[in-house]
Amino acid sequence: MIVVTGGAGFIGSNFVLDWIAQSREPVLVIDKLTYAGNVENLQGALGTSQVSLECVDICDGDRVLTLLRKHEPRAIVHFAAESHVDRSILGPGEFVRTNVNGTFALLEAARAYWSEISPSQQASFRFLHVSTDEVYGSLGPNDAPFSETTPYAPNSPYAASKAASDHLVRAYHHTYGLPTLTTNCSNNYGPFQFPEKLIPLMILNALDGKPLPVYGDGLNVRDWLYVGDHCAGVRAVLERGRPGEVYNIGGRSEMRNLEVVRAICRLLDELEPKAKGSYAEQITFVRDRPGHDRRYAINPGKIERELRWQPRETFASGLRKTVQWYLRNRGWADRVRDGRYRDWMKRQYGDAGAHEAP
Ligand code: NAD
Ligand code: DAU
C-alpha cells in the first residue's frame, strides 16, 4: 500500500482518484483537513475499502510513525502543504510550520520506519516529495526555462518554505540513504481546485457577476499543466524515477495571466452565455501581489526522456474540461466557499484597490 499526505487537497485528491482508477493497491490518506482539505473530494474513493483517511497533522511525527508501522507502506507520496502564495504573504508562520517542520517530522518518521523494514523492502521503498517550480524564482522574458540544475532563488514565503523542504529531502537521501524522489511542477488547474487560486476564482467570480481581479498589468507568465497530467507524472516518477533524483514537470504551456482570464471568459460566453455582453467586461485590474514573480517556465525534458512522460491535455482542452467541471459542480463550489472563505476574500480583495487597466 501507499501513503498519500495531503490527499484531501486539490492535487492529492485527483492523485488518489486516478490511482484507484488504475490500480487495486490500497491508499492511506494522511491529511489535517485544513481549509484546503475537503473530504468531499474523496467521496467516491472513501466509500471503497481501497482508500482510508486519517485526520492527522504531518507535524505530529509520533502519530505518523505509528501509522507507518501499522500500515507498512511501500511508498509515501507527500503532497501536504500550505500552498497559496497570497496566504503566505499575509501569514508566513503556518507555511514554515507545515512545509518545513512538517516535512522534517515526516522525513524523521519515514527514516525511523525505513530503518526497521527488511533490506529488500528498504530497497524498493520510496519517499516522493511533491514540490513546485516557484523554488527557482522568477525568469526574464528571454531566459531559458527552469531545469533541474537551475539554482534555487525562492521569492515568497511559500516558495522559501518549499525550497527548505526540498533541501531537507535531498539531505535525507544524501546523508541517510533514504530513497527519495522530488518533483518540481508548474501551475496546475482542474477539478477540485480551491477557488482562491486564479482559474477557479475567475470562473466562479464570473458566474457570480463579480469583478475578475487581475493583479498588476496581468502580464505575468505561468506555465500551466492539467492536474491529471501532473498526477501521471508523479506516478511515473514513483514507479520509474531514480532515487535521489529531481524531476521537473510542466506543460510547455506558458500563458500571460490576462490571456488565461480572457480564455476563461470566452469559454463561459460559449457554454453559459450572459443575457447581455461578455464576461470579459468583468475584468478589473487590482493592486499587484507584493514580490510577484514575473515569469515561470519549466523544461520537462528529463521526465519526457527518462520516464517517457508526456502531458495528454493541451491548455485549450484542459481549460475546457475545467470550466465544464465547475459549471457541473456549483454545489461543490458553494459548499467550500463558507464563512472562512468569505473572510479571506474580504481580507485579500476588500482593500485591493481596483484601478484602470495599465
Ligand atoms: P492544497 O492547498 O489544495 O492542498 C493541501 C492539502 O494538504 C490539504 O488537503 C490540506 O488539508 C493538507 N495539509 C495542509 N497542512 C497539513 C498538515 N500540517 N498536515 C497534514 N495535511 C496538511 O494544495 P495543492 O494545490 O493540492 O498542492 C499539493 C502539493 O503540490 C503542495 O505540496 C504544493 O506545494 C505542490 N504544488 C502545487 C501546485 C499547484 O499549482 N497547485 C504546483 C506545483 C506543486
Ligand atoms: O508554480 C506553481 C505554483 O502555482 C504552486 O506551487 C502553488 O501552490 C500554486 O498556488 C500556484 O502559485 P501561483 O501563485 O502561480 O498561483 P495563483 O493561482 O495564486 O496565481 C496565478 C497567477 O495569477 C499569479 O501570477 C497571480 C495571478 N493572480 C492570482 C489571483 C488569485 C491574479 O492576477 N489575480 C488573482 O486573484
Image: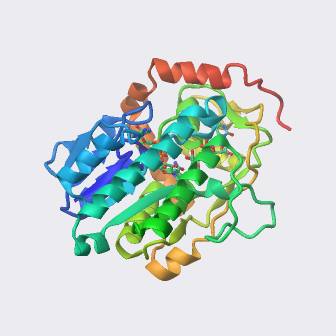
| Residue farthest toward the right in the current orientation of the protein | 358
Residue depicted at x 46% and y 49%: 104
Locate the N terminus by quadrant: bottom left
- Residue 220 location in percent, x, y? 74, 49
**Residue at 53%, 33% in the rendered image:** 94
Q: How many marks?
A: 0
Residue at the left extreme? 49
Does residue 311 show up? Answer: no
181 left or right, relative to 39: right
Q: Quadrant of the C terminus?
A: top right
Q: Nearest the camera: 58 or 328? A: 58
- Relative to 317, is 356 above or below? above
**Quadrant hosting residue 63:** top left
Residue at image location 61% in from the left, 25% down from the top? 210
On the image, the x and y values in percent for residue 115 come to: 30, 63
* Above or below, 43 relative to 190: above
- Would residue 314 be found to the left or right of residue 120 on screen? right
For this view, does 65 lie left or right of residue 342? left
The quarter of the picture where residue 77 lies is: bottom left
Give x and y (percent) for residue 291: 76, 42
Can you say whether 307 is above or below 135 in the image? below
In this figure, which colouring scheme has been used for the structure? Answer: rainbow
Q: Is residue 353 visible?
A: yes
At 81% from the left edge and 60% from the top edge, which residue is drawn?
140
Q: What percent of the width, then of the height, locates residue 273?
A: 54, 36
